[in-house]
Amino acid sequence: MSHSTWVSKTGLLAQDAKMKAIANNLANVNTDSFKRDDVIFADLFYQTQRLPGSPVDQNNISPNGIQFGGGVRVVGTQKKFTIGTQKESPNEMHVAITGQGFFQVEMTDGNMAYTRAGNLSKNADGVLTTTEGFPLNPRIELPEGLERLIISENGAVNAMVGGEADPVELGQLTLVNFVNPAGLLPIGNNLYRETTASGEAQEGEPGEGALGKLMQNALEGSNVQVVEEMVEMLAVQQAWEIIAKSITAGNEMDKYVTHNI
């Protein structure tokens, strides 16, 4: 395989990775609290035939070198945690985070996961959970005879219960934040795991420090912008076509050299 063909191959693989991310972003344009993915590239090693500053004779040095790049590679994908559009909801168990922060979710293995999706539900035991049935941490138990759920912007949870004149205190919702949210590990279902890259979870009440406040009867939409993704998709498609043509051109040049020189 010639050097130019190898370089073009790395370009095709890189553009394919970018297209996968765009396709996933567009597929989740209506997924509540979804955060778009971006792909990060870096150039590969260089073949150096002459270093910049090499002597050309006893009195002069070369101002330029001769170096040929080895192509491109994907060095990472990154979640963009910009805030999505707030959407009103008639469901009083729907809560949006209006700023930074994540809800804590207790998984079946006892470990914690984190989510910004506030489309909450109630399980058979009356515990407030995610739509997948994972309870929030701290746990909030909803009483029988619940007539109205009240979640304040600072996370205090109260309820109007049949037969009671005053609201009943149920508990306190907390949020966590990370030094580097982009370092969280997405595991599906709008959930993330803590990693050494994200740093440890820092817990606090909504509205405290850099943590956002809560908004009841609302949901955070996806932060995917369809127009921006379409523009990027067209750019990737054009790059793919040009790189594919460079492979054809390189092969034709190799054939010419082989048969005529």
Image: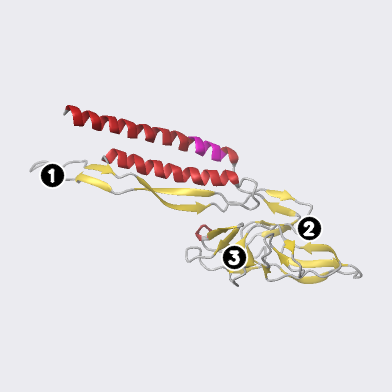
Is 233 covered by the magenta stretch?
Answer: yes
Left/right placement of residue 60 relative to residue 240 reads: left
**In this view of the protein, which residue sits in the foreground, 129 or 100?**
129
Which residue is outermost to the front?
A: 259
Q: CA distance from mark 1 to mark 3?
A: 59 Å
Left/right placement of residue 60 relative to residue 92 reads: left
Count all numbered tags in the image, as a single digit: 3
Q: Earlier in the sequence, mark 1 or mark 3?
A: 1
**Image position, residue 192 (x, y; %):** 57, 61
- Circle 2: is it few (<14), some (14-19), or many (20+) Cα within 10 Å? some
Tag 1's secondary structure? loop
Start and end of the magenta stretch?
A: 228-234
Identify the residue at horizontal 47%, vertical 44% (top origin). Answer: 18
Image quarter of residue 56? top left
**Image position, residue 202 (x, y; %):** 58, 68
Q: Which residue is identified by label 2?
A: 92
Q: Which residue is identified by label 3?
A: 113
Q: Which residue is identified by label 1?
A: 55
Q: CA distance from mark 1 to mark 2?
A: 76 Å
Left/right placement of residue 194 relative to residue 250 reads: right
Identify the residue at horizontal 43%, vertical 42% (top origin). Answer: 15
Q: Main secondary structure of the magenta part?
A: helix
Q: Is residue 28 above or below residue 235?
A: below
- Circle 1: is it few (<14), some (14-19), or many (20+) Cα within 10 Å? few
**Image position, residue 35 (x, y; %):** 58, 51
Q: CA distance from mark 3 to mark 2?
A: 23 Å
Nearer mark to the viewer, of 1 and 3: 3
Using the rendered image of the protein, determine whether residue 210 is visible from the camera's viewpoint: no
